[in-house]
Image (cartoon, rainbow, N blue to C red):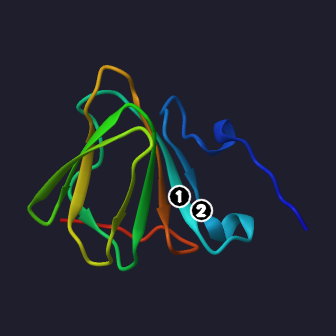
Amino acid sequence: MITMTTRNDLRSGDVGTARFIGDEHGSGVSFFWVDAPEGTGPDLHVHPYTETWVVLKGEALVDADGEQVRARAGDILTVTAGTRHRFRGASADNLEMVCIHASPSIIQEFV
């Protein structure tokens, strides 16, 4: 069986970022398809599972447990379970990035 949805179906209102919850689609993974202007992104948070990011466009400034990394289009980053992290769009172009959660639901605790 194949199920299909569109990015626009996964967006909430006028927000550019789309959220895919695996449980709702018969999938074992979830993800955010980020579309974020410069300087924006989620506050510091943590997950009980690994998160993998694929930067598609723009740049991201990532903070993870005191370490800071600048990621560019084509980069793939992995943040291990339990790591406090956040990111911000860091270029004039909107940051477009897929944040893959190794879980059929998104579990995040803001710290």
| Closer to viewer: mark 2 or mark 1 | 1
Image coordinates of residue 75 in percent, x first then y, are 40, 48
Image coordinates of residue 67 in percent, x first then y, are 12, 59
In the picture, residue 28 is in which quadrant? bottom right
Identify the residue at image location x=91%, y=68%.
1
Report the residue marked by disc 2.
21
Amino acid type of the residue that numbered disc 1 sits on in the rendered structure: Phe
Choose between 77 and 29: the one closer to the eye.
77
Amino acid type of the residue that numbered disc 2 sits on in the rendered structure: Ile
Dot 1 falls on a residue whose secondary structure is: strand
Identify the residue at image location x=32%, y=74%.
80
Say few, some or many: other residues with alpha carbon within 10 Å of mark 2 (under 14 / 14 to 19 / 20 or more). some
Say few, some or many: other residues with alpha carbon within 10 Å of mark 1 (under 14 / 14 to 19 / 20 or more). many
In the image, farthest residue toward the right:
1
Image coordinates of residue 74 in percent, x first then y, are 45, 43
Whichever of labels 2 and 1 marks the residue nearer the N terminus, that label is 2
Q: Is 31 above or below relative to 102?
A: above
